[in-house]
Amino acid sequence: MSSIADNIFKIKSSLPKGVTLVAVSKTKPVQDLMEAYHAGQRIFGENKIQEMTDKWQAMPKDIDWHMIGHVQSNKVKFMAPYVSLIHGVDSLKLLIEIDRQAQKNQRIINCLLQMHIASEETKFGLTETELHALLTSDVFKELQHIKVVGLMGMATFTENQEQIASEFRFLKSIYDRYSSQHAHNLAFSTLSMGMSNDYALAISCGSNMVRVGSLIFGER
Ligand SMILES: *Cc1c(COP(=O)(O)O)cnc(C)c1O
């Protein structure tokens, strides 16, 4: 069996320049994360705020913590002091709460808007119309303590590579359309798409941030 460090080195050496690896460590013990840390990994993705906060407290402070899961508004306050990027923002209401908690902590929190690109009903995310409405709303323009730095999406859970690729390309096309727009709280630099099974495909479709869990830490 290959070690966590080996897995990190193998994946990192396969990534083109400019593509960032988020090590998705949800459900894994701190000991496993520390092995990745000692292999040089400094960005970790978690999907539960309580678990991420416990790990943040237990681990070295030069780590960027990414929230990749669905976020409940009433829990934003627990990660607001330290979270480095929130991937799963899919409503103006949530963005307003993140802004409020960021202000309390006298910081600006970077966010990705999660887009619905999969054919499944259950996945979270905004439609293109909802994205447009959010970014052009007067309320959004007033937010001073968040910055929308890009988009995140998850493809349909399928073996069909052509379908996955077409969903990724669709997200990239939306990303490109908004990349030229700049405001005090809006500047796209990050397109988060691709997981263990489809990260190479996602990169070929324009991803510059991949979220890889089981390929590093083993099955959950
Ligand atoms: C769990 C998770 C991942 C990582 O999945 P793997 O298949 O283990 O690489 C990536 N993104 C999100 C949003 C996740 O919840």
Image (cartoon, grey):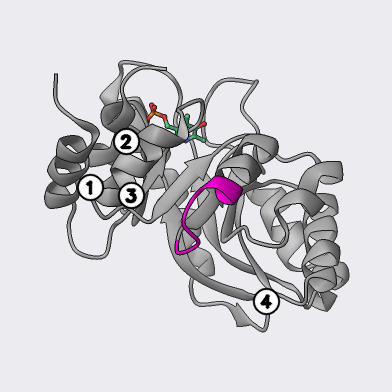
> Can see residue 214?
yes
Rounded to the nearest angstrom, the CA distance separating label 4 from label 1 is 29 Å
Local crowd size for mark 4, using a 10 Å CA cut-off: few (<14), some (14–19), many (≥20)? many
Rounded to the nearest angstrom, the CA distance separating label 2 from label 3 is 32 Å
Rounded to the nearest angstrom, the CA distance separating label 3 from label 1 is 27 Å
197 or 172, which is in the foreground? 197
At x 70% / y 52%, what residue is drawn? 79
34 or 213, which is in the foreground? 34
Q: Identify residue type, mark 2.
A: Ala
Local crowd size for mark 1, using a 10 Å CA cut-off: few (<14), some (14–19), many (≥20)? few
Ligand number 1: quarter of image: top left
At x 46% / y 29%, what residue is drawn? 29
Rounded to the nearest angstrom, the CA distance separating label 2 from label 4 is 30 Å
> Can see residue 205?
no
The mark nearer the N terminus, 2 or 3, is: 3
Q: Identify residue type, mark 4.
A: Asn
The spot of residue 159 in percent (x, y) is: 31, 15
Q: Say if mark 3 contacts mark 1, CB within 8 Å.
A: no
**The C terminus, quarter of image:** top left
Which numbered disc, 2 or 4, marks the residue closer to the eye? 4
Q: Identify residue type, mark 3.
A: Tyr
Q: Which residues are magenta?
A: 56-62
The mark nearer the N terminus, 3 or 1, is: 3
The mark nearer the N terminus, 2 or 4, is: 2
Q: Which residue is mark 2?
A: 165
Magenta-drawn stretch contains 61: yes
Q: Say if mark 1 contacts mark 2, CB within 8 Å.
A: yes
Instruction: Answer yes or no: disc 2 within 8 Å of ligand 1.
Output: no
Q: Which residue is mark 1?
A: 204
Q: Which residue is mark 3?
A: 37
The spot of residue 210 in percent (x, y) is: 36, 46
